[in-house]
Image (spheres, rainbow, N blue to C red):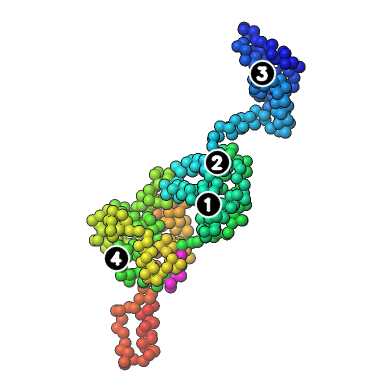
Amino acid sequence: MLTDKQCKNAVCAADKKRARFTDGGGLYLEVSPAGSKRWFWKIYAEGKESRLALGSYPAVSLADARRARDAARLQKANGKNPIQVRKVEKLKGLAAPDETFRAVALEWHGKQAPLWSDGHAARILRQLERDLFPWVESRTLSAIEPVELLATLRKIEQRGAIETADRALMVCRQIWRYGLATGRVSRDVTDGLKDALQPYRGKHFAAITDPEKLGVLLRAMRAYRGGVVVKAALQLAPILFQRPGELRAAAWSEVDFDAALWTIPPARMKRGKDGKEYGDPHLVPLPTQAIEIFKELQRYTGHGQLVFPGERNHDRPISENSVRTALISLGYTSELQTWHGFRATARTMLAERLDCDPLVIEAQLAHAVKDANGRAYNRTQYMEKRRQMMQQWADYLDSLAAKGMVDLTVEPPDPLRCSLGTLAEWCKCTLE
């Protein structure tokens, strides 16, 4: 066993790399020729000898070194590797000087933003700035308790923004998971908070899926007396069932009449930043009805770049509100039918009414493919099937619209010379 006096007088010969002075229980003092003295504890882990540094003498006295050795012994007895524990503690110390909610949230946002679209990244940042930072930005992430975060989320609920509160919780959950991964926190305080908030069920875009009701809507859309550009977008929406932003921003350079194909660039698709920059374009086969509408519209807007230019600024496309307003003018509010809802209309009726392959439908909707064959299979193998399906769908819409139209080619009976039964039978035949 060493004494304080021995530690103080310990030296290393100039011709040696180091000298070791053993205390006991694996503890020893290592002295260099230059005179530096450091404490080490010898440890065996996984059959290999290694050592744990316990500090320099005399800053760490003999008594302090023994206490550090005993603490490391206890860790080892509990199944922990003291050297690994030391490394983790060191990483925690280097993780970030600022551990506030704001600092960690912005760090997480910075890591994720390159994977998101610019719009999504901006929305997340706005939510942080508006709904979370005002209340907990200066609090240390590890110090925030579940009840404190719950109170913050309930402030969002109090203004009636139930969906926003639900989204804020999802953001917080990702921040805490990032905090766990980077050693800022030891638990996820968002666990269980969803049950304490007002339940929110995501609303689907209103969509008509009844054939008879859809026929009525289609007839109303074809009789729309608004502008040529909006009417064309209104009629193409159910036929092509692409997202509003993708349709209204279409350019004439994307439409190939000879190939009957509309090619949407990846940058305009609903994807992450990587998919927008390096993904494949989305191909939309054009049925004959769509081509007719495009060609008619080309007479009015073909001189410009955009298929659906705005009325005031031809360099910008029509807004999403243009078609929404047109639907409202026809009596179809957002509770009955939305522009985006035509995707759900097509998805449901193609499967239920026309018995189309769900994988082909999903490929045409540009939804992420989850099958083992991947996206390439859908772009090639499904292309011909998608072309057939799109024509079948357009023909089906025509049949629904025609069922309620009066056939003016049939001579009506003279109401003054025929019975009421004959007149009723004529009306029935022409309306079928």
Q: Position of residue 68 (x, y in %)?
A: 70, 26
Residue neighbourhood size for the residue with mark 4, other residues' Cα within 10 Å, grouped as few (<14), some (14–19), many (≥20): few
Q: Which of 370/42 is in front?
A: 42
Disc 4 or 2, which lies upstream in sequence? 2
Distance of mark 2 from mark 3, alpha carbons?
37 Å
Q: Is residue 157 shown above or below 47? A: below
Q: Amino acid at mark 3?
A: Pro
Say which quadrant the C terminus sits in.
Answer: bottom left
Q: Which residue was labeled with disc 4?
A: 227
State the image coordinates of residue 21 (x, y, percent, origin top left): 70, 14
Residue type of the residue flagged with mark 2: Thr
Count neighbours of disc 1 (C-alpha within 10 A) and say few if under 14, some if 14 to 19, many if 20 or more: some
Q: Which corner quadrant holds the N terminus? A: top right
State if disc 2 and disc 4 touch (CB < 8 Å). no
Helix, strand, or loop for circle 2?
A: loop
Residue at position x 38%, y 56% in the image: 245
Q: Amino acid at mark 4?
A: Gly
In the image, is residue 428 above or below residue 1? Answer: below
Q: Earlier in the sequence, mark 2 or mark 1?
A: 2
User: How many angstroms separate mark 4 from mark 1 (CA)?
Assistant: 41 Å
Callouts 2 and 3 close, C-beta under 8 Å = no
Residue identified by numbered label 2: 100
In-front residue for pair 390/226: 226
Task: For marks 3 and 1, give the one nearer the viewer.
Answer: 3
Q: Nearer the viewer, mark 4 or mark 3?
A: 3
Q: Mark 1 sits on what residue?
A: 168
